[in-house]
Amino acid sequence: MMSQSRGAVSFEPLFTAEEIGLGKEAHVEHVMKVFVTLGEGLASRWIEMPRGVLLLQTVPDDPASGAIYLYDRELQVFYFVVFDEGRDDSLTTAEFDELVAEYNLVSWTAHPALLRKAIGKTAMA
């Protein structure tokens, strides 16, 4: 069995689009722009799927400052992607690309309902 480079991955709910002042009808590009602006960052990587968006947000002029966020387009909830071991808030674009592949983050982005089920099981445990 192979172990993953940063241990287990989890997704911490942050807030909804409504909580940052956006209505349910807001277009996903506008939602992402508002989210990045609130964090005073840049969208260094963006993977958009019909049901979710995976985003690497970095600080301007600091390429090793990225954090990964997943946006559930159906429930309009933002999640912070957390790794049990190692950094999860000082990533480069190259590390993002590696972690996306290693942890199959695109699958979670494509199917946020699975993410919601996993979080629900953890909350009940």
Image: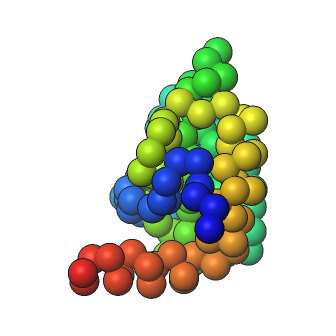
In this rendering, is residue 91 above or below 55?
above
Horizontal side of 3 relative to 14 (left or right) equals: right
- Residue 50 x, y percent position in the rendering: 73, 74
- Residue 104 x, y percent position in the rendering: 69, 64
Q: Residue furthest top?
A: 61
All told, the count of numbered labels is: 0
Q: Residue at x 45, y 84 (%)?
A: 117
Horizontal side of 39 relative to 47 (left or right) equals: left
Q: Is residue 96 visible?
A: yes
In this rendering, is residue 91 above or below 49?
above
Horizontal side of 46 relative to 17 (left or right) equals: right
In this rendering, is residue 5 above or below 19?
above
Task: Report the colour scheme.
Answer: rainbow
Q: Residue at x 53, y 30 (%)?
A: 90
Q: Is residue 34 visible?
A: no
Quadrant in which the C terminus is drawn = bottom left
- Residue 63 x, y percent position in the rendering: 66, 23
- Place residue 121 in its image quadrant: bottom left
In this rendering, is residue 74 above or below 56?
below
Q: Residue furthest front?
A: 1
Q: Residue at x 64, y 79 (%)?
A: 111
Quadrant in which the N terminus is drawn = bottom right
